Amino acid sequence: MRFDKYEWTAISIMASLFILVGFIQGWSVSLVILNMCIISAIMTMGVNISWGYAGVINFGVMGFLAMGGLAAVLVSYPPVKEAWHVGGSGLGISFILLVVLVTSVYFITKLVEKKSHKYWLNGLVIFFGLIIIRHFFLNATDRIEEVDPALAGFLGGANLPIIFSWAVGGFFAGGVAFVIGKVALGLRSDYLAIVTLGISEVVVSVLKHEEWLSRGVKNVIGLKRPVPYEINLQSSDWFINMVTWFNSSKLNDIIDPNKKQEMLTNLVIDGSSLFVKLNYAVLFFIVMIVIYYFANKAQISPWGRMMRAIRDNEVSANAMGKDIVKQHLIIFVIGAAIVGVAGAMLVTLDGLFTPSGYRPLRFTFIIWIMVIVGGSGNNLGAIFGGFVIWFAWIEVAPLTTFLINLFTSGLDPQNAIRLHLLDSVPYFRYLLMGMVLLLILRYRPKGIIPEKVRHS
Amino acid sequence: MTDIINSFVVLLNFLIIPGLSYGSQLALGALGVTFVYAILRFANFAHGELMSFGAMITILFTWFFQSQNIGLGILPTALLALPFGILATIILGLLSDKFVFKYYRKQKSVPVVLAMVSIGVMFVVNAIIRIIVGTETIKFSDGQKFILKAKQFKVMTGLNEGLAIKSSQVITILITIALLTFTFWFLQKTKTGKSMRAFSDNEDLALLSGINPDRVVFITWLIVGTLACVAGTLYGLDKSYKPIIYLNLVLPIFASAIVGGIGSPFGAVVGGYVIAFSEIMVTYAYKKFFKYLLPENLEPSSLVQLLSTDYKFAVSFTILVIVLLIRPSGIFKGKVL
């Protein structure tokens, strides 16, 4: 991981931006942005692996993120025993029936020789099979959803520490990606973009409406945390001692013991929220560095170079005996899995799972802008893109407010145009994102930190 | 006998007429996507925003006319404002082509890059729309709301079931027929239309025969702008205008275009209706329909609904995936106008 001068400049500019925000808007704001930046960077690396290494387009980011989020719920939430009790057997039966259905379709496809017979037989088996399964399944899910609908109404999870879900989220997303890839990867790139975009919408709508699984639009709140709670910190001695030690000069200036105690309490409250965010940041940073390390290793390995060969010239890579379909599938699954890890982390950070919050504009297209802006094919570029774009996404609002106030300072403060513009401040970020994407694609199509091709 | 008629009226009221109007809106949208794909050769993700933009300008003019007390009587004022919306949408399309797409066309960029670029355009237009009218739902249909009310129909025919026809549905279907007829006549009969077909079939050959590419592109944006604005406005008239909806509409539109065979105008229209009808048919609850047809003891207790309405979206995509797997070029072989 040697960076050249240009890359160091990029890193240090980014770091100083965070420090600047820390001094102007407070360290809490700075850390909140940093946490989301790191998660965005991981998503971006996931997309970058499939698009940058192998040229496989993946517009299903939103769906894979949602799968990761689902993993966070299923791993960490305590199981709802009653729901299992009333609906478990029904779900089990429908699952077994589904397996039977799939195997029979498989054997029909294998054994029946005449093509038209095959289609008709399969169609009939699937139709009637689904009707039977539906009966058991709906019965079970209805019962599950009736269990204490205000608080539960779903199966719950495995009651494990939520940090495990980061890996599980990767597996979930990878599994979904495997199915999608099997079906869709043969398509041309722009078709693939549309199909993955559509399937991700389907995944999200399943999560939204299958309440027995994910509680749907009722959301899951109060997920566990991998880091301590502020309340516990505020009452623990070592933390208070630490805060006292950090602010000893400030505290020593105050002579009145009452005031001193009040000041200390405030400092502890502020410090605890800051400490929690810092813990998250450290955890996320470790994950990011690990993924970055392996992604880089993979890129310069023979496998990575083969991927580049496939990306740059499919025909000749094929002629060299590389199985393009298989490799495309592998890299699509890996990329999606990394996005799934980020999805689980996102839900961990928020502490809640809201399926209706997954929108393509925010969770697919912005991530793609990050990849393009940062530099596709370069992992550091991907991280940088994630940081820059998320930073801009947040900081554009205060900046626009400032600019609008500046430009309309000659106008009456109640001027209709001025008020309308101030109302629409949140929408200027879309304008900025679009402009940034267009400008980068036009004048620096390889991104801010372009791919480095190593010849070895 | 009346039972059979009753059940048919149920279908007509809840399935066929809504399907026809929604299908018309999808067909117009898909036709626009197909034109861009056949002539400019990329998947235009900004098409939904183009529709939204056209509808927005139409709404602004509708408001203006309403404030001046100019109206069309029983017809919605939006029809009067529609030409201005079309003009603005065409100008937006031409501007986006001049400042953005043209560069990549000259560079002969791969289609994926152009698709990315169109995402950039999508963001910018989306932002402009939100900055101008916000994100609230806007209802702008005025004039007479129903051509035929359910009660009137019941009195007229003496049937149990009512049939309601909204004027926006009739307007949608009529305008679609007119616009489609014109477009197909233009492509088949006029010299410019023929040159466009030649251009989409084989660009090099068309250039050699002296067809002016800039003119073809210009005409394309005229058609695409018109189609987009009309489709967007009709959708807004029918269901009320909401800027965010159009982004979600892009996917069924793409599905329609691809199912029909992207690049084939006829396919786009057929695809639009296929997607619309299958979305509605799969998610419709047939309980009422069967109530009239079956004897009383066989009456279904459940809703007889294949999938809940929440999965409307999934239906269009399942069809898309199946079509792409069985017949990748769509129902009608695509790629050529």
Image (cartoon, rainbow, N blue to C red):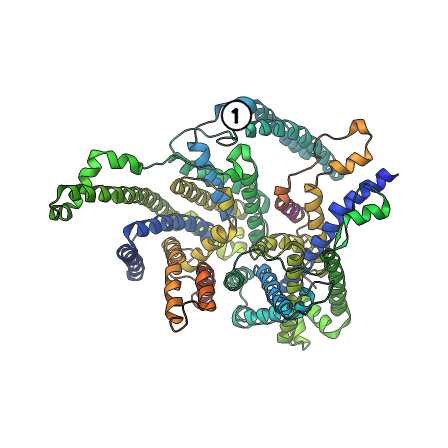
User: Is residue A219 rendered magenta in the image?
Assistant: no
Please, which residue is most extreme toward the right here? B1
Give the percent coordinates (x, y) of residue A192.
57, 51
User: Is residue B321 rendered magenta in the image?
Assistant: yes
Q: Name the quadrant containing residue B112.
A: bottom right
Position of the N terminus of chain B, as image quadrant, is top right
Left or right placement of residue A367 versus residue A267 in this view: right
Left or right placement of residue A352 versus residue B88 in this view: left
Residue B37 to residue A90: above or below: below
Left or right placement of residue A253 versus residue A157 in this view: left
Q: Mark 1 falls within which chain?
A: A
Give the percent coordinates (x, y) of residue A363.
48, 50
- Residue nearest the observer in this picture, B14 or A127: B14
Say whether residue A455 is visible: no
The residue drawn where x is 65% and y is 76% is B212
Magenta highlight: main SS: helix
- Residue nearest the observer in this picture, B91 or B325: B91
Q: How many marks?
A: 1
Give the percent coordinates (x, y) of residue A33.
35, 51
Give the percent coordinates (x, y) of residue A208.
54, 40
- Residue nearest the observer in this picture, B11 or A227: B11
Residue B139 to residue A65: above or below: below
Position of the C terminus of chain B, as image quadrant, is bottom right
- Residue nearest the observer in this picture, B73 or B7: B73
Say whether residue A186 is visible: yes
Secondary structure under tag 1 reads helix
Tag 1: amino acid: Ala
Please tell me how crowded label 1 is: few (under 14), some (14-19), or many (20+) other residues with Cα within 10 Å. many
Q: Which residues are magenta?
A: B316-322
Q: Which residue is mark 1?
A: A83
Residue A261 to residue A136: above or below: below
